[in-house]
Image (cartoon, rainbow, N blue to C red):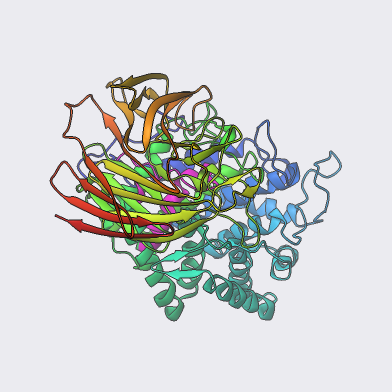
């Protein structure tokens, strides 16, 4: 149990998590108390311990500590009707006055100036933190801002107003001037510029809206948790706080559409799917759930909303997200430096404060009083296509796992192709596995060229449908596309079963092709190769992800079906975000034709050892138009797919 004093569980009201509003309040109080011990002079900067500062420097990191915890305090106090028994608002008011007294461009902290906030500059981190401060001030205005001395309001307003005129990074950052503008316009400060910042921000994100509740984050195909905790959160909160019915209709409707899909990405254990950057923000993934309830823009029942949100918060607090002092660490369960981006510092994890948005809902709101209801992953096995991001969401009720098959998100810029980012480029992600960041790639299809495994590069979606998703990519090696080679990839899914097919066109005969499966990690790992060297399994006992010594195992299986001829496993001595050591299965084969088909079957299971299941039946044949793939699932359902270079046609038969 984390170093936070929590009330007893209430399994009558919350049969799944045991948590109620009282648990959320206690968690918020514990997090704020732990941070407060690290406040600097006049509470202006909160410098948290850590070996690795962000690329913006220690002064900026101290501002992060102030801004992100101020937002948590704002949710806690505003949700209590202004009740502030721990004296948080006076401390943050003192910090606001001190930090804006003489803003500086100096990155380092000095004995001569341990309090000044960084000046907001073009694409500077202070712009991000200004948004959290402005939102916190807007939420707590009756108890803080309206009681400040006029000179403090003037200089704090002037510091914030720089965000209205400086250039943001061309992605979700446009929402930071919008959020600052929303507060300043309401407070009557620099109103014209503030209103223009709001208009610019909304216009900018409109250009990235693809429909069905999905935005791409500045780049052509960048989909991740920023959809929920940024693109939907800020516009909806701005509309809600301003009482703007028109904006609420527009952005609330989009949020509801997004929640209809994203609610399926939480596992039964509470884990959000492990995909995309800034994962150290952890339970910030709950923010859009609360936002939907706050604004009346959600397809979820109140009981399901709280079940998913409480599940997410408890998942991390039960698995070592806090250190012995009660501070959020930089990682997933506990500290995991490989997954932390260079823009993150010791206080960055406190963007998770957004996950406490639900405290703005009064105690008598149905989201707090309704009995918890199951989340989508608990209701039955499901396979849901998401056409906009090019994803296929596969969940199994028996173990509560959620798998995200990725045939549409690569986070590649428009005018260049960068090296693969494992958090985006993998063929699949899940709620129980993390991509390998230091070792052989998991969930990857590559050609071996000059002893090097090719990268996926830019992904071109080919569609999604009933139980399938497909894409095309042009393999890359040494920073360049391999001339004339195209890989057309298809995943089919039913229950816990997966079939992966890859049509490799244009490669030299004899070229080795490798595919890897799910990387499992924990405290101990077992590996095995079964049969005539054609089936690889990797099994991990992950006691860090279990509530007790129940013997649950996470099993990754990958089997050759066609084209692949050998199998094995690769050790992961550095593990993943889910465990200290791990292993990943792989299969391999060689190109025999100008267009060679490679097919494998895979599964990811969690739980006790179960009796063997009926195998997935796979059959392939050549056709004038390409390669035909026939799949019969253990439940008797069937898929038939036709793969040709750059095109896929799939038919399902039940």
Q: Quadrant of the N terminus?
A: top left
Residue 363 in view of the camera:
no
Q: Is residue 105 above or below residue 575?
A: below
Residue 472, x across and y down, in percent: 46, 55
Q: Is residue 75 left or right of residue 68?
A: left
Q: Is residue 607 left or right of residue 226?
A: left
Residue 145 in view of the camera:
yes
> Does the magenta portion include 290?
yes
Which is nearer the eye, 4 or 494? 494
Location of residue 170 (image quadrant): bottom right
How many marks the image carries: the answer is: 0
Residue 597, x across and y down, in percent: 38, 45
Q: Residue at x 14, y 44 (%)?
A: 635
Q: Quadrant of the C terminus?
A: bottom left
Location of residue 464 (image quadrant): bottom left
Q: Residue at x 68, y 52 (%)?
A: 94
Which is nearer the eye, 585 or 211? 585
Residue extending farthest to the right is 112
Q: Which residues are magenta?
A: 265-292
Q: Is residue 115 left or right of residue 599?
A: right
Which is nearer the eye, 333 or 380? 380
Residue 545, x across and y down, in percent: 37, 29
Q: Is residue 154 left or right of residue 601?
A: right
> Does the magenta portion include 649?
no
Residue 618, x across and y down, in percent: 24, 42
Which is nearer the eye, 592 or 341? 592
């Amino acid at each position: 149990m984390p170093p936070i004093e929590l009330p007893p569980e209430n399994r009558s009201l919350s049969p799944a998590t045991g948590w109620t509003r009282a648990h959320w309040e206690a968690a918020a109080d514990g997090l704020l108390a732990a941070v407060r011990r690290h406040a600097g002079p006049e509470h202006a900067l909160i410098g948290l311990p850590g070996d690795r500062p962000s690329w913006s420097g220690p002064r900026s990191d101290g501002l992060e500590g102030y801004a992100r915890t101020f937002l948590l305090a704002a949710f806690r106090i505003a949700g209590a009707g202004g009740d502030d028994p721990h004296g948080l608002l006076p401390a943050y008011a003192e910090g606001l006055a001190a930090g804006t007294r003489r803003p500086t461009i100096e990155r380092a902290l000095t004995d001569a100036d341990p309090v000044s906030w960084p000046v907001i500059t073009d694409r500077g981190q202070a712009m991000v933190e200004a948004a959290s401060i402005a939102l916190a001030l807007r939420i707590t205005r009756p108890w803080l801002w309206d009681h400040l001395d006029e000179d403090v309001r003037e200089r704090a307003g002037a510091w914030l107003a720089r965000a209205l005129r400086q250039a943001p990074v061309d992605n979700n950052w446009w929402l930071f001037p919008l959020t600052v503008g929303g507060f300043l316009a309401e407070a009557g400060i620099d109103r014209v510029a503030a209103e223009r910042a709001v208009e610019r921000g909304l216009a900018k994100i409109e250009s990235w809206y693809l429909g069905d509740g999905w935005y791409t984050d500045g780049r052509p195909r960048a989909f991740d948790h920023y959809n929920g905790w940024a693109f939907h959160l800020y516009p909806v909160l701005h509309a809600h706080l301003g009482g703007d019915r028109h904006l609420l209709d527009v952005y609330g409707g989009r949020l509801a559409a997004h929640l209809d899909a994203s609610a399926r990405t939480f596992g039964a254990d509470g884990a959000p799917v492990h995909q995309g950057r800034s994962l150290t923000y952890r339970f910030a993934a709950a923010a859009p759930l609360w936002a939907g309830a706050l604004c009346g823009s959600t397809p979820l029942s109140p009981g399901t909303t709280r079940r998913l949100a409480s599940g997410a918060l408890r998942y991390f607090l039960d698995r070592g997200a806090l250190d012995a002092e009660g501070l959020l660490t930089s990682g997933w369960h506990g500290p995991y430096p490989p997954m932390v981006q260079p823009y993150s510092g010791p206080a960055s994890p406190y963007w998770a404060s957004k996950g406490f948005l639900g405290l703005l809902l009064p105690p008598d709101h149905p989201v707090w009083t309704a009995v918890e209801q199951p989340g989508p992953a608990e209701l039955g096995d499901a396979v849901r296509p998401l056409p906009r991001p090019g994803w296929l969401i596969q969940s199994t009720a028996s173990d509560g796992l959620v798998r995200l098959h990725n045939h549409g998100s690569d986070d590649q810029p428009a005018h260049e192709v960068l090296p693969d980012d494992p958090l985006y480029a993998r063929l699949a992600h899940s709620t129980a596995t993390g991509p390998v960041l230091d070792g052989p790639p998991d969930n990857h299809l590559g050609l071996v060229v000059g002893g090097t495994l090719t990268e996926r590069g830019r992904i071109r979606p080919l569609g999604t449908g009933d139980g399938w998703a497909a894409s095309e990519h042009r393999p890359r090696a040494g920073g360049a596309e391999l001339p004339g080679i195209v890989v057309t990839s298809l995943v089919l899914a039913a229950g816990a079963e997966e079939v992966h097919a890859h049509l490799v066109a244009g490669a030299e005969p004899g070229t080795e092709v490798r595919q890897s499966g799910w990387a499992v990690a924990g405290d101990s790992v077992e590996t095995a190769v079964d049969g005539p060297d054609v089936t690889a399994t990797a099994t991990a006992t992950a006691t860090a992800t279990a509530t007790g010594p129940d013997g649950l195992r996470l099993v990754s299986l990958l089997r050759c079906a066609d084209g692949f001829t050998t199998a094995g496993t690769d050790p992961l001595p550095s593990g993943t975000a889910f465990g200290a050591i791990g292993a990943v299965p792989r299969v391999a084969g060689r190109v025999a034709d100008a267009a060679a088909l490679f097919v494998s079957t895979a599964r990811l299971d969690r739980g006790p050892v179960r009796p063997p299941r009926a195998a997935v039946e796979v059959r392939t044949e050549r056709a004038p138009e390409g390669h035909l793939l026939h799949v019969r699932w253990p439940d008797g359902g069937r898929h038939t797919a036709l793969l040709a270079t750059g095109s896929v046609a799939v038919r399902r038969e039940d």
